[in-house]
Amino acid sequence: MPDSPIILVPGFWLGAWAWDDVAGILRAEGRDVTALTLPGLESVDADRSGIGLADHVDAIVRAIEATDEPVVLALHSATGISGYAATDRVPDRIAAVIYVDSAPGRSPLDPGFAAAEKPLDWADVAAEENLDGLTDDQIATFRARAVPVPGGVLRDTVELTNDARRDIPSTILCTGFPSDQVKKAVANGDAWLAGVPELRNLTWIDLPTSHWPMWSRPADTARVIGEVAAKVAPVGR
């Protein structure tokens, strides 16, 4: 029996393809799954000059509103900021949120970022993120398919005004760093974690692996998402 529709949002430099393994597992279980490619991330040739954070929020909201029932929204990495803003827009259309090595963040992520776009700098990413469990082929595919992120997504601000977002059942799936470490980081006031203290219905789950668990532990990532979807399934399902 299908549960709540699931929307999968990939992090920086990625398109819907990043969720292929997880989406395939969930669809094989009979679930309604949509993976998004956010504006400007379609290809390296896409025009990113006029794309800002609001465009990413709008794209997520459109996907949510296209479903017949409230969704389970899975947000990876930096899309915790655009996704959290989407929960502020349409909280009644969201059954649950899963922050996949992510968190409810408040914009701007990097107010001083002045460039038109942010390409993948693998040396920087590899120095900052957990790569445990990733294969050489997965890393090579990521580097080959990576698309620059529009600069406006990093420096723009989207205001949050709807208190109802705070009551949405939310799960933070900690993969690259353990939850105890992330909880300590919340006190530092980083933008990507700024919404954590605001949530009134929050669950923490540890799944030790890379920052990209959809590649390094796809079955376990799908299991967590599926369990959340089943828990908030519409009455009668």
Image (cartoon, rainbow, N blue to C red):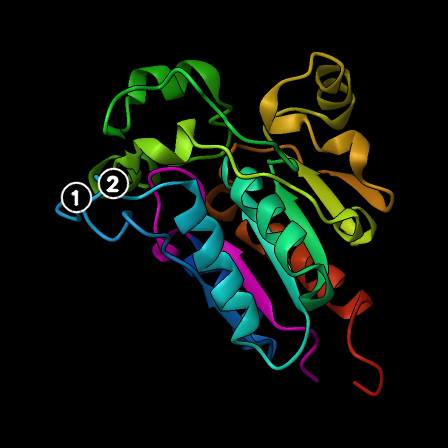
Q: Position of residue 108 (x, y in %)?
A: 50, 27
| Front residue (pair 44, 210) | 44
Which image quarter is the C terminus in? bottom right
Q: At label 2, which amino acid type do we have?
A: Val
Q: Which residue is mark 1?
A: 44
Q: Position of residue 220 (x, y in %)?
A: 63, 51
Magenta segment boundaries in residue numbering: 1-18
Q: Earlier in the sequence, mark 2 or mark 1?
A: 1
Q: Nearer the viewer, residue 226 or 91?
A: 91
Q: Amino acid at mark 1?
A: Val
- In the image, which disc is placed on residue 147? 2
11 in magenta: yes
Q: Residue at x 64, y 43 (%)?
A: 99
Left or right of 20: which side holds 60? right
Whether 203 is drawn above or below 152: the answer is below
Report the Cα–Cα distance between label 2 and label 1.
5 Å
